[in-house]
Image (cartoon, grey):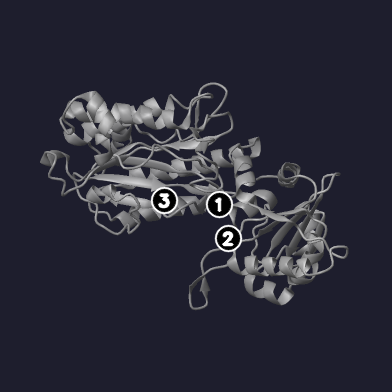
Amino acid sequence: MIKAEEYARRRRQLMRTVGEGAVVILRAAPERVRNHDVLYPYRQDSDFLYLTGFKEPDAMLVLVTEASGGRSILFCREKDPVKEMWDGAMIGLEAAVSEYGMDEAWPIGEVERRLPDLLHDRVRIVHDLGRDPAFDTQLIGWLNAFRGKPRRSFHAPDEIVELGHLLHDMRLYKSRGELSAMRRAARVSAEAHVLAMQACEPGLNEADIHATLVQHFMREHCDVAYSPIVGGGANACVLHYITNNAPLADGDLLLIDAGAEYDGYAADITRTFPVNGRFSEPQRQLYELVLAAQAAAIDRVRPGSQWEDIHEAAVSVLTDGLLALGILEGEREDALEQGLVDNYYVHKTGHWLGLDVHDAGDYQVDGHSRELEPGMVLTIEPGLYIRADDTRVDERWRGIGIRIEDDVVVTRDEPEILTRHVPKAIADIEALMGA
């Protein structure tokens, strides 16, 4: 797990970044009602989690920056024996200081009384306006009230600076502790995908495979990082398919996109394999093409490469392969210039990965594609999707959806593939399923 010292280091780094005389305000994620009096399982806001490690609702982090470094103040729930009897142990004020490294902890019910005093003589507020409209209205109301007072008695901050732009660049570079958590999430996810391959056979339902994945995540003390995609046959061509309740037919492919979350950090793996354990010839040809595109893209995950280089590498391989198979027609340069592969490859080749599956961080800097640096973690996930009703192609290609996705760390040398323990070569997949 990430240690309290690392969360404290992150807070100090953020305070140095925002500068002296600022106050940073960040609220915990609210609980959400599923239906009537049933709540969704609680998941902390990722920015809040990044700075605190605190996983309870009804909390607010306030960082007051000073020349000497500043203070970390957490508003949170007080321990309540009656509530703990119903809902379990609460962290409370004392543990917020002793275990979570806060300088001070105050009851969440005292925000309205104490927070205005913390704004006094601050030159700026660092806060994400729009995330919590009700609190934004309250904050702006305080500022307007302060500005109505004599300036000698109360100096209100002059500006509100967006927190996300500053914090998300920090989140882009993963520490040793973060990479350790991501390796565990990747390992558990890889084991679940292997179990799914071993369990799969014609006559099962997508729901059976879904259950296999989630059971393993939970047995290994992980959460589900996102709703799994388990799409058999033409369902694999639906990019965000999460219905997961159709029968698995002999002769179809099954696409699984699923990842575990450990200590807040996500894994994200996609594998595509035959329900009956043997690829047909058209499936084999398209699969080998996607696998070659992924290899070319992973090879570009090196310091100094630009983000767009990765996508271009995959597009180049896919375009060549689709022309060779007769799915695309014409000259190569024309096909690339016109983006003909976009008919069958409709998304980018990856995204940042971390506390969020689509993690924080800009893909462009100053109008240019971002350069990769050590410590960044991203997915590499080319795919091809030929819908069952696509009459532009020969019938043998229709209804085939394939995606292959791995989690990759940018290092100073060769890229580290966190999810390498899930088979993806055709011979390895067939051997595993045949066993």
Badge 1 is on which residue? 221
- Dot 2 or dot 1: first in sequence order is 2
Badge 3 is on which residue? 213
Provide the secondary structure element on which disc 1 rests: loop
Provide the secondary structure element on which disc 3 rests: helix
Badge 2 is on which residue? 131
Mark 3 and mark 2 in contact (Cβ < 8 Å)?
no
Residue 427 in view in this figure: no
What residue is shown at x 53% (from left), y 64% (from top)? 41
**Residue 171 pos. (x, y %):** 61, 42
Residue 69 in view in this figure: yes
Provide the secondary structure element on which disc 2 rests: loop
Amino acid carrying label 1: it is His
- Give the alpha-carbon distance from disc 2 to disc 1, as whole Å: 30 Å
- Give the alpha-carbon distance from disc 1 to disc 3, as whole Å: 13 Å
Amino acid carrying label 3: it is Leu
Nearest the eye: 202 or 251: 251
- Image quadrant holding the N terminus, namely top right
Nearest the eye: 300 or 267: 300
**Residue 91 pos. (x, y %):** 72, 62
Mark 1 and mark 2 in contact (Cβ < 8 Å)?
no
What residue is shown at x 59% (from left), y 66% (from top)? 133
Question: What crowding class fits label 1: few (fewer than 14 Cα within 10 Å), some (14-19), or many (20 or more)?
Answer: few
